[in-house]
Amino acid sequence: MLRSTYRVLRSPFRDFPRWAARYGDPFTIPTVNGTVVITGDPELIKVIFSADPEIYGPWAVNALGPTLGQRSIFMLEGAPHTRERKLLAPPLHGDRMRAYADVIAKVARRRFAERVESSRVLTLELAQGISLEVITRAIFGARDDESARALQAAVIDLVEASSPLMFFMPFLQREFAGLGPWARFRRRFVALDALLQQQIDRARRSPGVDVCSLLAQATYEDGESMPDAAIRDELRTMLFAGHETTAITIAWAIELLHRHPDALARVHAELEALGPDPDPEAIARLEYLDAVCKEAMRLYPVVTEVLRVLHAPLRLGPVEVPAGVGVSASVMLAHRREELYPDAETFRPERFLERRFSPFEYLPFGGGHRRCIGAAFASFEMKIVLGVALSRHRLTLLDDGPATPVRRNVTMAPGGGVPIRVRDR
Ligand code: HEM
């Protein structure tokens, strides 16, 4: 069990296709969090995503509780989960989301320009800096540089004080006279919360267009407004769900584009057709750039498995999966099916211009009742960041060979962080 958990965590890109070939699809693996039945077959993924939400609970979320808080959407299920999604989703879509275009472009312009003289820049670090600043401004609602910087510093401090070991082993969650890793984590948690509370207080006094302001004004269907503690939990949730994931995808897209000069040339042509210093919203509408982001997430989905735990039995093809067992829609296996994606190991963005894929064939953001609520926002941000960077700069990869995926907590990121040099075009 420890061995299979280790392999699930360490090398899903290598081991999952082997297990599916050896045992058939679906296949079952024991993990320290319980048994999981895994499928990459779109027919069975459809069964998972279309089943009644009431039969599911979230998978192994206890470890997330200390960081996200008990009111986080990740911790909820059933009716309270549906109720929460109705409030959280609107600020991240449509016109409300498009209002963040300039913020994203401004942050990306400044952060890339700052690195022009550096001899070596890690794309992943640069992209993380951008996505964190975008979150502090567009989601937390920081309106000046000073509060944006304070929020970013508090997040970085909290991340530094977090250790997966501590979260998975509740007996380590003890303060020893205010000392030890748990006490340090709690101090930093409280410090970030105090800053988030300041944002909420300001949003209640003079609302802006940021997500925090929109949540502070929103009401549930019964007319009740969101309590401050719930807003703080959801702001932290959006930070942890959206910060690293978006940055990793940007880093993959830069790596893959620069190893495929034809694709890069096509993106440059699209950007040049928009004229000098293109409008960020126009960048976000570019078709080929959109296909590039989709293809990067197809080949290297940041989250390789979408997991749920069953409260009631579910028939998955030949297998009757009992209650208490986990089911997983394998993003990675679905995305590498040759009959859907010919030459599946190859980066070829054109495939997204040639045909449409169903939500059970292409699922980088999961699916069904828990599909990522930040999907539109993340895609919008990725395209603007890439468009700004590539229209202003010439990027050179510094590693000889392609990056391979390595695990970072729940996500898979390009190993080595994609070192580059940034020069003006
Ligand atoms: C490339 C970037 C991103 C990727 C690949 C990604 C991927 C995912 C995946 C796979 C899930 C689980 C879906 C499921 O269980 O079916 C998820 C859930 C979620 N994501 Fe994202 N995400 C990204 C960005 C974001 C952003 C920017 C935000 C918020 C600003 C966000 C907020 C959330 C939330 C709140 C959930 C939980 C939804 C629920 O349980 O109902 N994500 N994401």
Image: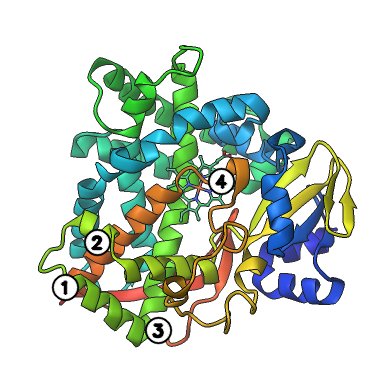
Residue underneath mark 1: 273
Q: Position of residue 222 (x, y in %)?
A: 51, 13
Camera-side mark, 4 or 3: 4
- Please indicate, yes or no, whether residue 11 appears anywhere in the rendered image: no
Residue positioned most to the left: 276
Q: Secondary structure at mark 1?
A: loop
The residue depicted at 45 percent of the width and 75 percent of the height is: 354
Q: CA distance from mark 2 to mark 4?
A: 25 Å
Q: Could you tell me the amino acid type at mark 4? A: Arg
Q: Is residue 153 visible?
A: yes
Residue designated by label 4:
371
Are the residues tagged 1 and 2 within 8 Å (C-beta)? no
The earlier-in-sequence mark between 4 and 1 is 1
Q: CA distance from mark 3 to mark 1?
A: 23 Å
First in sequence: mark 3 vs mark 2: 3
Q: Which residue lies under the disc numbered 2?
A: 283
- Front residue (pair 120, 298): 298
